[in-house]
Image (tube, helix red, strand yellow):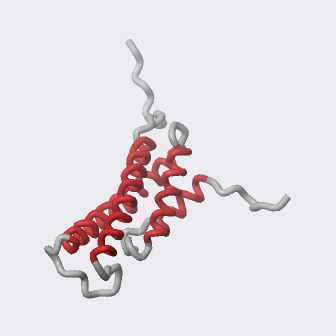
Amino acid sequence: VGGLASPFTLDAALGLLPLLLDAEHDALEQYERAMGGLNLARHVLLQLQGHSSDAQVRAVRALLARQLEPVDARLRARMDELWLVANGRAPKPDSDEGSVANAAEVQMCFTRFQLQLSVLERVKELAKVVLERPVPETSAAAPADG
C-alpha cells in the first residue's frame, strides 16, 4: 500500500500556517495562497476543539498574534483603499503590485477581500475557542478545604 511514511499531523499543519498566512504577502496577488492557508487553519482549529495539547495551544496563540491579526489589519486596510478608489475619493495606485485597472476589477477585488475577511473572521473565532479551553493545573497545588 502506497502512502506517506508518516501521517500528516495537526502539528505539521500548524507549522505550515505561518508560511501560508503572511501579512507581508499582497492580499490580491496571493489570494489563492491565503485562502488555502485560511481553509487549512479552519480545518486544524476544528480538529483541535476540546482536545489540544499545551504546545498546540501555544502554536494557536502565536498564529493568532503573528499571522491572523496582522493579516486582518492589512486586509482591512486594502479594502479601505479599494473602497476609496471605487468611490472616486482616491486615485488608482501607480504601482503594478496589487493594482487594479478599472471599476469592475476594483469591485471584483473588493468582493474577494470580503470573502477572505469572512473566512478569516471565522478562523479567528475558532482560534479563540481553542485558546479558551481550560488549562490543567500543573505546578500549583490546589488549596485544601479546611
Q: Is residue 103 left or right of residue 53?
A: left
Residue 100 percent coordinates (x, y): 32, 79
Residue 27 percent coordinates (x, y): 38, 71
* Farthest-out residue, right: 1
Residue 128 percent coordinates (x, y): 39, 45
Which quadrant: the C terminus? Answer: top left
Residue 32 percent coordinates (x, y): 48, 69
Of 100 and 77, nearer the camera is 100
Residue at 47% from the left image edge and 65% from the top image edge: 18
Of 91 and 76, nearer the camera is 91
Which quadrant: the N terminus? Answer: bottom right
The quarter of the displayed image where residue 118 is located: bottom left
The quarter of the displayed image where residue 2 is located: bottom right
Q: Is residue 97 above or below residue 20?
A: below
Residue at 48% from the left image edge and 34% from the top image edge: 136
Q: Is residue 103 left or right of residue 31?
A: left
